[in-house]
Amino acid sequence: MSTLDHNFNEIAEDKARSASYPPPFSIRFTFEERARLDAERGRHSLAAHIRERLFGDEASIRKKPGNTSVGDAEALGRVLGALGNSRLSQNINQLAKAVNTGSLPVTPETEADLVAACEEIRELRLELMRALGKSPGASP
């Protein structure tokens, strides 16, 4: 069957019926209306704000898969600040390069420093997991 024999409207309707959500509805706003909605919506998405205005308490909550809400914004800020102020990634990269070239002498002090660095990374990971509302035993 050639593409000329297909009825594309029927194909589109079949796909729309089989979708998990109905097709989107478009609406145009004036610049002033859009600015007002943007000012009113706060931290919500525009779509969520419009749904809430239309349906009030009966508006269904939508959540994108993979998006996790922050359980503790203050803890997340502390972790990100600590990571930003650290030279952790550069130091680990230098250690890996030294190991690969064979120039890293393994002394008891070096081993103790590596163990301490691993513990700090473990603590940062636990704090980050708590901030994101995940259980500390969860895999990354």
Image (cartoon, helix red, strand yellow):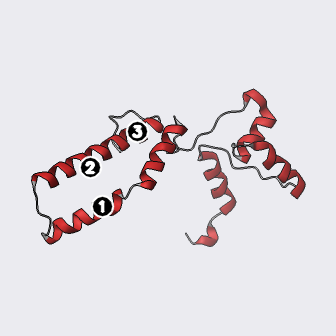
Decide if residue 47 is on the left or right side of residue 62: right
User: How would you rate the neighbour count of disc 3 (Cα within 10 Å): few for under 14, some for 14-19, many for 20 or more?
Assistant: some
Q: Residue at x 76, y 49 (%)?
A: 25
Q: Is residue 74 visible?
A: yes
Tag 1: residue type? Asn
Tag 2: residue type? Ala
Decide if residue 17 is on the left or right side of residue 129: right
Locate the N terminus by quadrant: bottom right
Q: Position of residue 36 (x, y in %)?
A: 85, 48
Q: Which residue is mark 2?
A: 117
Q: How far, Cα to Cα, is label 2 from label 3?
A: 15 Å
Q: Residue at x 63, y 43 (%)?
A: 21
Pointers 2 and 1 in contact (CB under 8 A)?
A: yes
Q: Which residue is mark 3?
A: 127
Q: How far, Cα to Cα, is label 2 from label 1?
A: 10 Å
3 lies above or below 63: below
Q: How far, Cα to Cα, is label 1 from label 3?
A: 21 Å
User: How would you rate the neighbour count of disc 2 (Cα within 10 Å): few for under 14, some for 14-19, many for 20 or more?
Assistant: some
Q: Position of residue 28 (x, y in %)?
A: 84, 55
Q: Which residue is mark 1?
A: 91
Tag 3: residue type? Glu
Local SS, label 3: helix
Q: Say which label, 2 or 3, has the lower sequence index.
A: 2
103 lies above or below 60: below
Closer to us: mark 2 or mark 3? 2
